[in-house]
Image: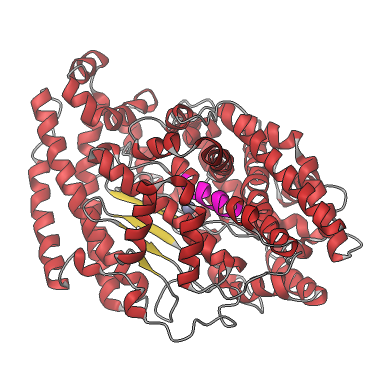
Amino acid sequence: MGKKLYKVIIPLCISVFCTTAISKECYSQCITTKNNTISIVNNEDNENPKKEIKKEINKAPKIDYSKTCWKLQSLYSSEKEWKEELKQFTKDTKELENYIGKVTKSKTHLSFALNIKEKLDRKINKLYAYSKLNQDINKNSYKYLDMNESINKANMDYMDICSHLELEILKLSDKKYEQIISNKKISKKYGMYLAEIRRSKKHYLDEKSEDLIARTSTIASLPGQTYELFRNMDKKTNLNPSQYATVLEYGDRNERKSAYQNEFIAYNDNINTLSGLLVGQVKKNIFYSTERGYKSSLDMNLQSDDIDVKVYDELIETVTKNTSSLHKYVSLRKKILGLDKVYYYDMFVPIVKPVDDDITYDKGQGIIYSALGPLGKEYGDILYKAFNEKWIDVYSNDNKVSGAYCLSVYDDHPYILTNYNNTLSSVSTLAHELGHAAYEYLSAKNQNYFNSNPSIFTHEVASTTNEALLYEVLIKNASNDKEKAYYITQYLDLIKDTLYVQTMYAEFEKTIHEMVESDKSVNALVLDDIWGGLLKKYYGGNYEVDQLSKVGWSRIPHFYNSFYVYKYATGCSAGVSFAQDILKNGPDNYIHFLKRGSSDYPANLLKDAGVNLTTTKPIENTIKKFDSLVKELENIVAK
Ligand SMILES: [Zn+2]
């Protein structure tokens, strides 16, 4: 092994770790290792005021942690058992290795090989989950760090075998492939998996070029890695991310301004270096897309989800046409807060005070049962299991990682990590993660293994639908105007952060890639100007774009995971649209969509369930909702 091959592999082994990536101020980092069996969307969540805030204020009193932690013994009874299983797994991979050079020899060879692959995938999925989940609640333990290293090493070797086999499938002639896929059994079970591999066929180069390209991969990741070194080690500020987020949300105006300046100056002082890194990332994308014969780097990145560039373009166009709704919201913020101008550091302070600051976990569960009630009994039963069968590690503690995520194990059940802190935002985070969990659970129950791993594109729909339902129901059932206004602002912020802000990011990415693609010079000044222009366009005349705010682009780690953020915006549009449809017409369409897992391409699955992202209707629906919420808030405030 060792020789790197062209990776066309779509991860099927480790289920998605999906996270609440939404932060009011900046989306946390997400890394998707698409070319690896283990797919991670990890939320560092280090700038998420919604979740970090008030942890100190709202320490849950005398919690019985034994009832609110994971029960990982259902995966393995002991570490000894885990170690033995890992050893066995490594041995078992040899069986699959035997198919290298033979996998496409006949339909039988292919079925046998994929049958073995499924067993191995499911095993490593479970092995990985045990080590990852343990590590995340024992973050200072070297024992789990070692386990994680062993599993990563085993996975790398396994991936190498898989990539050999998948390369053979990719290289098959169309005629031979058609013959194989004409077999109904193969097509039903492995059709989507094989189609994913074949989709890259026309962009595959010859062996020598592929080998050369594979060897450039460590150089290609340098811009992103160097950016992380800056952000985590060299950037010097006087507040840590959590403190910074707290001040931006709860500080008085002078404190907020000072925290903002301190943070942004740290980036501004290195802005030329940071612009060099981002341009490096863009040039890397252009190099690969050109060499592989894609129309553009955008086209290359969107093809991983089989999404047409038109969807991306129309997202930007539709939001651009409707920025006036966001302008109205900024203007309302200015009015309620009594400001002369709204600056960056005025965008996170709540405009309506929270109505309940102490939502116990029990109470939070009650709110979720009621908000997700419209999803029907089957969904309610899954929630019951999640709450009562130890799927969730609820509270934070010193040994536990921050943030929130959901990790699913095909042969077990989904696991959710949260840092619940009795705020409405932690209820919303829980609803979000339960959206991922229920999606995985229903996919696994209703699809074969190869069709049970939904993409991030549809996953974020399932999670946002729950958040949208939560706010819809809370607003509807609010007992007075104060409560209603508070819930409205929370819903508004969800749509602002997920649809508007992420579309602005998506437009920035598209603009800079197009500039470099057409040989235009891009440096720090150019990037600052583009960012400043976008802030003005999205936030409107009441938003003051001061010089320092123009370096905002340099603070977004997602730009090193290119053309990713638009999925939050499309996910939000679909989620808000689904929530309204569920409340009006019942949950059947939506539940059916969840059960279909990854048995078709994301856009088709959504379209069949009534949310067609190849049209602008879901985006328009969401903007209409945003508009009506702004009006409702205006009316309440005017009373
Ligand atoms: Zn999520």
Asked if the magenta segment contains residue 463, the reply would be yes
Residue 419 seen in this snapshot? no
User: In this figure, which colouring scheme has been used for the structure?
Assistant: secondary structure
Residue at the image position 79 percent from the left and 51 percent from the top: 329
Residue furthest to the right in view is: 340
| Nearer-the-camera pick, 523 or 258 | 258
User: The C terminus lies in which quarter of the figure?
Assistant: bottom right
Magenta residues span 462-471
- Residue 384: x, y in percent? 35, 59
Secondary structure mostly seen in magenta is helix
Asked if the stretch drawn in magenta spans residue 192, the answer is no
- Exactly how many numbered labels are in the figure? 0
Quadrant hosting residue 96: top left
On the question of residue 94 being in view, the answer is yes
Q: Is residue 386 left or right of residue 607?
A: left
Q: Is residue 228 above or below residue 616?
A: below
Above or below residue 432? Residue 516 is: above
Measured from the top left, where is residue 575 in percent x and y? 54, 43
Task: Please state the horizontal and vertical placement of residue 278, each as a whole percent of the image.
Answer: 60, 50
Q: Nearer the viewer, residue 443 or 25?
A: 443
Q: Is residue 10 left or right of residue 183?
A: right
In the picture, measured across the screen, residue 437 lies left or right of residue 153, that is: right
Q: Report x, y in % for residue 374.
A: 48, 46
Relative horizontal placement of residue 588, taking residue 148 as reference (left or right)? right
